Image (cartoon, grey):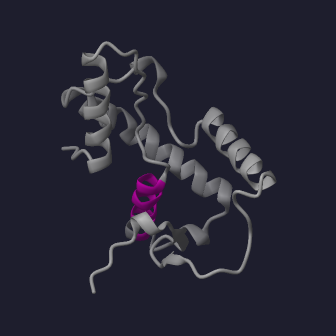
Amino acid sequence: MLVLSGVCRCQFCCIVRHRMNGKVTLFVPGCDHAGIATQNAVEKKLAREENKTRHDLKRDEFVRRVWDWKNQKGDRIYHQLRKVGGSYDWDRTTFTMDEKSVKAVSEAFIRMHEKGVIYRANRLVNWSCTFNSAVSDIEVYCTV
């Protein structure tokens, strides 16, 4: 059973509240969150079934496996969202690796880089050994 994340629950409550107050809203359903959970699921499956990491595959092969996962699990996730009463625009479902999403993200990063909002530099970052990637401050839980 799907357990809605705190962010998803907050989004749902905000959408419902605004609709109850007569505002026009758009709530687009997706079967992954920025691809992070999807990537994690695919990597765990790869490790469990083939004893490999994503680094053992070429990018195209890993992306194909992400699409395979989406094709296997995406409908189930949408079904669960419908069961919990998600107030979504079901004609606009999205997936992080959809061509339109990939293009929009790339364009946004290029624009932000050109404006100097994001940049490459040697800086101390929060690093996830699991994902082999930088993690934002908001995603770090300090247990000390």
- Between 40 and 135, the one nearer to me in the picture: 135
Q: Residue furthest top?
A: 22
Q: Position of residue 125 (x, y in %)?
A: 56, 77
Which percent across, then down, holds residue 73?
36, 41
User: Is 45 covered by the magenta stretch?
Assistant: yes
By secondary structure, the bulk of the magenta-drawn segment is best described as helix
Relative horizontal placement of residue 50, taking residue 96 as reference (left or right):
left
Q: Is residue 4 above or below residue 45?
A: above
Residue in view at x 33 percent, y 73 percent:
141
- Residue 46: x %, y % from top left: 45, 64
Q: Residue at x 39, y 58 (%)?
A: 41
Q: Which residues are magenta?
A: 36-47
Give the position of the N terminus as an image quadrant.
top left
- Above or below: residue 90 compared with residue 42: above
Figure disc tally: 0
Quadrant the C terminus occupies: bottom left
Q: Nearer the viewer, residue 105 or 52?
A: 105
Residue visible at 42% across and 61% down? 40
Report the side of 38 relative to 141 (left or right). Answer: right
